[in-house]
């Protein structure tokens, strides 16, 4: 039987002082995400909250999300742009985003090896697809090769920007639908080439609410569903009533975007689930928390004040970045010399 190495998971089972190495084959990331979504929608997941997606943007944040026990994550374009020193206005290219997705995948894989479980699935921000419909298809294939479980494609005009800031605009209805259709076709073509369940699931996002109104945004979500997307995302609803109406009128898996101090009401996860949301993303929580913590540390350094009480211990930091696992592996392969 041919085994693709990218889908192998090493599971370590410890018995007394002996370590037994068990090798098992994990399902492709998109298939695992599909199973997770289905379990949430059919009620077999048995949780009072939707699937929570703290958003990551590099290898470290991916590791932290996985080690904290979350079921999935989302690679945020805002975060990737920020750690490259830019605002989220599509100044970061397709190649840079694909590279970031590969780094995130490595972080999730390394955390999974430490925890003895499958890597959690990640949905990656694909922005506008970086060009026309053909570019969108290339973007889907490129993200698939980084082992992303899903990809978000949106209907903004390039260069796009964060959905909660001023100045955004969207492409015409037909172009938006064709953009999503191209992404869905690429998913299916990838499945045909590399096996069912290997093509990234398509999260279709619309920003039309702000520019064209609520009804136009709903129309786009419904059209995206008709051409085959796996999940929809109505960006920046401005009231609980709009959130409820979206969930009532649009079927399938749906994403809520819980941006603190953004345009959308930030609600408890339990309430989001009751509305009908399948997933809840927290796009900037980790980034904003780290900025605040780093600024506080810089202020103390500038004033000559010790920082020990506001930072992780050195032991904690080493463990978070992987030194504990590295040391164990180093000892495992140590020679007698």
Image: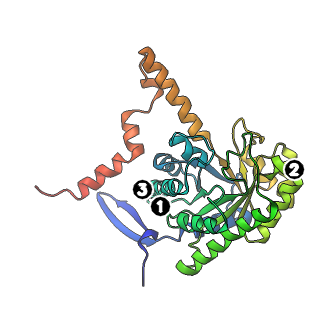
Q: Position of residue 170 (x, y in %)?
A: 76, 53
Judging by the rendered image, the residue that carries numbered circle 1 is 117
Q: Position of residue 32 (x, y in %)?
A: 58, 67
Using the rendered view, name the quadrant where residue 111 is placed: bottom left
Q: Which of the two residues, 56 or 221, is positioned nearer the viewer here? A: 221
Using the rendered view, name the quadrant where residue 247 is placed: bottom right
Question: Which residue: 63% across, 65% down?
Answer: 136
Crowding around mark 2 (Cα neighbors within 10 Å: few <14, some 14 to 19, many 20+) is few
Position of the N terminus by quadrant: bottom left
How far is the residue under mark 2 from the one under mark 1?
A: 44 Å
Judging by the rendered image, the residue that carries numbered circle 2 is 213
Q: Position of residue 51 (x, y in %)?
A: 66, 55
Judging by the rendered image, the residue that carries numbered circle 3 is 110
**Label whose residue precedes the other's in the sequence (3 or 2):** 3
Left/right of residue 215 with respect to residue 20 in the rendered view = right
Position of the C terminus by quadrant: bottom left
């Amino acid at each position: 039987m041919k085994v693709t190495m990218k889908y192998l998971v090493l599971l370590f089972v410890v018995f007394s002082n002996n370590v037994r190495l068990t090798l098992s084959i994990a399902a492709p990331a998109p298939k695992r995400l599909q199973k997770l979504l289905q379990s949430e929608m059919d009620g077999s997941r048995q949780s009072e909250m939707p699937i929570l997606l703290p958003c990551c943007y590099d290898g470290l944040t991916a590791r932290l999300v996985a080690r904290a026990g979350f079921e999935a994550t989302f690679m945020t374009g805002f975060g990737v742009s920020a750690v490259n020193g830019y605002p989220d206005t599509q100044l970061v290219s397709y190649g840079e985003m694909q590279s970031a997705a590969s780094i995130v995948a490595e972080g999730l894989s390394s955390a999974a090896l430490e925890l003895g479980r499958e890597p959690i699935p990640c949905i990656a921000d694909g922005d506008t697809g970086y060009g026309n419909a053909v570019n969108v298809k290339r973007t889907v294939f490129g993200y698939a090769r980084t082992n992303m479980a899903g990809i978000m494609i949106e209907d903004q005009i390039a260069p796009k920007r964060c959905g909660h800031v001023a100045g955004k605009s969207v492409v015409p209805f037909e172009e938006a639908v064709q953009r999503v259709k191209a992404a869905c076709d690429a998913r299916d073509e990838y499945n045909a080439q590399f096996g069912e369940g290997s093509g990234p699931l398509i999260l279709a996002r619309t920003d039309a609410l702000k520019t064209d109104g609520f009804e136009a945004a709903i129309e786009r979500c419904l059209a995206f569903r008709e051409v085959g997307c796996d999940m929809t995302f109505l960006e920046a609803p401005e009231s609980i009533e709009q959130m409820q109406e979206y969930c009532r009128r649009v079927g399938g898996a749906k994403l809520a975007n819980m941006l603190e101090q953004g345009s959308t009401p930030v609600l408890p996860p339990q309430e989001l689930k009751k509305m009908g949301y399948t997933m809840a993303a927290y796009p900037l929580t980790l980034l904003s928390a780290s900025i605040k913590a780093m600024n506080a540390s810089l202020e103390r350094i500038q004033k000559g004040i010790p920082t020990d009480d506001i930072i992780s211990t050195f032991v904690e930091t080493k463990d978070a970045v992987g030194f504990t696992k590295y040391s164990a592996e180093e000892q495992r392969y140590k020679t007698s010399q």
